[in-house]
Image (tube, grey):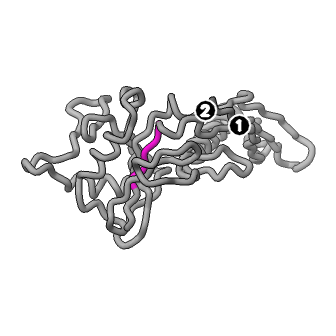
C-alpha cells in the first residue's frame, strides 16, 4: 500500500471596486464580483489538476514523470508516443492507450483533448474508412472517441506540427486523482486600505495530486 501526502495551497484574489459603484449600481456588484472570482478560481483549479507543478498549487497529472507503455512503475505515468513531432499519423496509439488501461479503470475513463488535437483527430479514419471521431447525435450528450467520452479541454497543451506535445490523455480522474478541498471561498471586505475603493480579499484552500498512476495514459505526439 502506498501512502500519499497532499498539501493544501491557498488561492487568493484582491480585486477593487469603488464605493460609488457598490452604492449606486443597479445590480448587486458584490455578488457579481464573488461569482467572477469563483469562476476565475475554478479555471485556475482545473488547469492545475492537469498541468500544475505542485508549487503553491495542486500537481497535475501531466507534471509527473513518465515511462514507456508496458513498463508500469509506481510514481510514473505510462506514455504512448506517436513517433512524429506534433502529429497523429496513426489511430493505433488510441487503441494502445485503451489496451494499456487496466479494465477496472475503463468504466470511468474519458479522453482529455486539446482543441488543436481534436482538429487532427477528426481527420483520422479506420481501415474501413469510418471516421474515428464519433460526434454526438443529440444536444447534451458527449462526443466519443473509440467508444469513450471526450472532454475538450483548453487546459491540455496545444498540438502544433513539428513540436512535441502531450495533447491527449485517457484518464479516470475519480480513481486516480485526489482533490483536497479544505474550505469554501471566503471573502473579507476592506473599505479603508484603498479609499475610495473597497478592497476584497478572497481565499480558498485547495490541494490535489495523482494517487493511482495506472488510471492515466498519456499520448505524446513526439518521436
The residue sitting at 78% across, 33% down in the picture is: 187
Residue 93 against residue 163 in the figure, above or below: above
The residue sitting at 71% across, 34% down in the picture is: 30
Q: Position of residue 40 (x, y in %)?
A: 61, 44
Q: Residues within 10 Å of mark 1 (few under 14, many from 20)?
A: some
Q: Which residue is under mark 2? A: 178
Q: Position of residue 164 (x, y in %)?
A: 43, 66
Q: Residue furthest left?
A: 128
Q: Residue furthest bottom?
A: 162
Prevailing secondary structure of the magenta residues: strand
Q: Residues within 10 Å of mark 2 (few under 14, many from 20)?
A: some
The quadrant in which the N terminus is found is top right
Q: Visible in this render: residue 76?
A: yes
Q: Secondary structure at mark 2?
A: strand
Quarter-of-image position of residue 124: bottom left
Q: Is residue 19 left or right of residue 173?
A: right
- Dots 2 and 1: beta carbons under 8 Å? yes
Quarter-of-image position of residue 123: bottom left
Q: Is residue 199 left or right of residue 185?
A: right
Q: Which residue is under mark 1? A: 6
The residue sitting at 36% across, 29% down in the picture is: 103
Q: Nearer the viewer, residue 30 or 222?
A: 222
Q: Position of residue 176 (x, y in %)?
A: 53, 34
Q: Check if residue 216 falls in the magenta segment.
A: yes
Q: Position of residue 93 (x, y in %)?
A: 30, 52
Q: Check if residue 30 falls in the magenta segment.
A: no
Q: Is residue 144 left or right of residue 12?
A: left
Q: Secondary structure at mark 1?
A: loop
Q: Which residues are magenta?
A: 215-219
Amino acid at each position: 500500500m502506498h501512502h500519499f501526502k497532499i498539501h493544501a495551497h491557498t488561492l487568493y484574489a484582491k480585486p477593487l471596486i469603488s464605493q460609488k459603484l457598490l452604492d449606486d449600481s443597479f445590480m448587486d456588484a458584490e455578488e457579481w464580483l464573488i461569482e467572477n472570482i469563483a469562476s476565475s478560481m475554478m479555471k485556475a483549479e482545473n488547469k492545475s489538476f492537469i498541468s500544475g507543478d505542485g508549487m503553491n498549487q495542486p500537481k497535475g497529472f501531466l507534471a509527473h514523470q513518465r515511462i514507456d507503455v508496458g513498463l508500469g512503475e509506481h510514481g510514473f505515468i505510462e506514455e504512448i508516443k506517436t513517433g512524429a513531432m506534433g502529429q497523429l499519423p496513426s489511430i493505433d496509439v488510441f487503441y494502445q492507450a485503451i489496451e494499456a488501461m487496466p479494465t477496472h479503470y475503463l468504466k470511468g475513463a474519458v479522453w482529455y483533448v486539446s482543441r488543436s488535437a481534436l482538429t487532427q483527430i477528426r481527420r483520422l479514419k479506420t481501415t474501413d474508412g469510418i471516421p474515428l471521431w464519433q460526434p454526438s447525435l443529440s444536444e447534451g450528450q458527449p462526443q466519443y472517441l473509440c467508444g469513450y467520452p471526450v472532454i475538450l479541454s483548453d487546459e491540455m497543451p496545444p498540438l502544433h506540427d513539428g513540436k512535441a506535445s502531450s495533447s491527449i490523455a485517457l484518464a479516470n480522474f475519480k480513481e486516480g486523482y485526489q482533490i483536497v478541498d479544505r474550505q469554501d471561498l471566503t471573502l473579507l471586505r476592506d473599505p479603508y486600505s484603498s479609499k475610495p475603493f473597497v478592497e476584497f480579499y478572497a481565499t480558498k484552500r485547495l490541494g490535489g495530486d495523482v494517487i493511482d498512476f495506472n488510471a492515466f495514459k498519456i499520448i505524446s505526439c513526439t518521436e
